[in-house]
Image: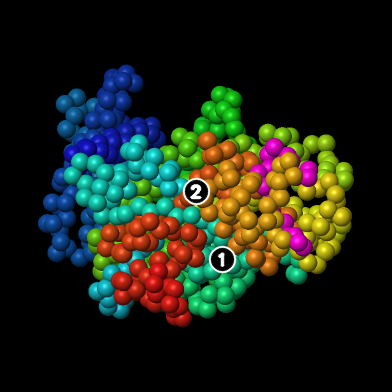
Amino acid sequence: MRGVRWRRVASQVGRSVAVWAVSTLTMLVLAGILPDFRLRSADGDSATDIAVKAAFGAGAFGLLSAVVWPLLVRLLLLVPALVLGLLVFFLNGALLLLALRLDPGERGTAAPETAVVVAAVMSAVASATGAALAVRDDDAYRRRLYRLSDRRRRSGPPCPSTPGTVFLQLDGVGHDVLLDAVAKGLMPTVARWLGIGDGARTTHRLTPWRTDWSSQTGASQLGILHGSNHDVPAFRWYEKDTREVVVCNRPTSAAELQRRAAGYAGHDGLLAVDGASRGNLFSGGAGQQALVLSIAGRRSRENRSRAGYFAYFSDPANAVRTALSFVAEVGREIGQSTRTRLGKQRPRVSRGGLYPLVRAFATVVERDVVVAAVTGDMLAGRTAVYADLVAYDEVAHHSGPASRDAQKVLERLDRSLALIENVAEHAPRPYRIVVLSDHGQSPGETFRSRYGLTLGDLVRAGCGLPVPRRAERTRSGAEARAAVRAALRIPVEESGERHRPTRRSEPIVLASGNLGLVSFPDVTHRMSKEEIDARHPALLPTLANHPGIGFLLVRSDEHGGVVLGAYGAEIPLADLDDNPGPLAPFDPGAADAVRRTHSFPHTADIMVNSFHDPADGEVLAFEEQIGSHGGLGGEQGKPFLLSPLGFSPPVDEGEELVGAEHVHRVLRRWMRESDGPQVPLESSEERAA
């Protein structure tokens, strides 16, 4: 507490010094412009004397304004508002003249009418400077939210007394990354919740969980919010029946996936009753939605996907706070990327072009807007809120999951958690804060940088097709880029990604982190191993024996499905528990994840998982990312669930929390424990969860 108090005092002193410096500069400029206002004697003074005079005058004026002005206002409370408005200018001018007279040298002079102008300009500049600095301070920012929420509560219906629940998703933060950040002191709020530190009382429990094979936001968040991620084999995949590429962060695809999940699960979602969805790919059935990608493709007055931006930036203080931080973040990214380039750091991916702006959007704009929306929901008394903070995920893709850049983002995310926790103390109902992640990230260089070719090049070579002399980069599919396009009303569908193949005889190769998908569009069904071998005899051996490939999954006429690996390894899915074969280096549960994906209707003809080194958790991304997720291998498949002790344990002792659908059932159970909204059609399995 003493350290926090000293930091607060230092921040206030710093703001005061900054306002003083700006006021001094303003006074010097006005003295040079206005003929009846001077800061030197008739005989002339040196530049140093003039600067000292300006600093003294600005300081005296600021001190008098802070001390004398409140007393004058109290004396003039009975004066009509219009008269008081006119008196403000004259009284302010009188304070400036008094400030100039306080200088023992008495060099400064000003005509009374000029003093009024100078005082007005200096007051405006000092006020603007102080406001710009104050809005970047979380305490000042929180006080503004309280004032806004008071007006909202007075005009709204009475709030229930039962606890509400806030679910905060830290996108891409793995379980071990979180623990490492806590151990390094980067996340003191999380550390305090876990009872780490002097005098800290444990309030939360930390539980790891295991993702499905598709360890990415689309599959995880769809399962968590809507209770089903059936038939989501990857971040992007080709569907032969519609001849379309489905991409989880494309608005039209997200809307369709949400519709399918609701139909498959039999309910609207986790947030169907008095819920709010903020910054997510999917709505969760919430009535209150902002920055939700699944509604971003609508072109109607009911489209509220950008409503959160408008509501946030309509407040000038918010705009100033975020704009200053945005500019600082762009400069920070340019400096960090320059340092890694000059230091020849490896692995490394390109961070030029518009990426500094995309990063600043994810780490500043979207964070500020989402946090403001969540605090507004809490102060309005909503029952359930689910929000996604994508900052870490975006930075870790380009800088690495354990990089200093990513760790700085975790520090700022922890401050956001502290802000939300403090706001909860002033909410009209008690709140329980659950923090979770949708997946982790695994480090490693890209497949292209290690081998000089992309997965698509390797597939073309195995099919006997011409391979480009120079491998082209595979565009990253990070969520932040889709959010930027949605905010700017740039259709994601027109971003250059091919939807329909132009040559039906050529395979379609798609990447989702270190998971690759190969589909043959001219064959209407999922091809079997026997059919692929008959058509392209060298393809499967070329892929399976490549050192950058971990294993393949294909359908088999003889065994139903098989996993292929190097040196002719071919393990039927039914035998993987006894003989994991190529799956041996991967985490426990890999066999179950592969079998589940094999059952999906839209699983690709060939599913390709990259090499994985269990010693350091390294994978090889098929996209341009040095921190990746989407397949099996390493930290990407081990996210976390941080829950209050007031909730029942997520799973019984000795059990594992496996799959996003299982997490959904746990969250539903907790909401029932808080007498929160209940999703209909509970099964006996869900009641037992």
Viewer-nearest residue: 239 or 255: 239
SS label for mark 1: loop
Q: Quadrant of the N terminus?
A: top left
Disc marking residue 62: none
In this rendering, does residue 208 appear at all? yes
Residue at (39, 74) in percent of width and height: 687
Q: Is residue 254 magenta?
A: no
Q: Quadrant of the C terminus?
A: bottom left
Left or right, 535 with respect to 552, comes to: right
SS label for mark 2: loop
Residue at (27, 63) in percent of width and height: 646
The residue indicated by pointer 1 is 229
**Which residues make up the magenta segment?**
541-558
Disc marking residue 440: 2
Tell me where residue 670 appears, x and y as whole percent: 35, 68
Q: Residues within 10 Å of mark 2 (few under 14, many from 20)?
A: many
Viewer-nearest residue: 7 or 79: 7
Q: Quadrant of residue 251?
A: bottom right
Residue at (83, 64) in percent of width and height: 523
Tell me where residue 200 appears, x and y as whole percent: 21, 46
Left or right, 676 with respect to 303, comes to: left
Residue type at tag 1: Asn
Q: Quadrant of residue 387?
A: bottom left
Which colour style is shown? rainbow
Tell me where residue 668 appears, x and y as whole percent: 40, 70
Residue type at tag 2: Gly
> Label 1 to label 2, Cα distance in Å?
18 Å
Left or right, 164 with respect to 470, comes to: left
What count of labels does the image hold?
2
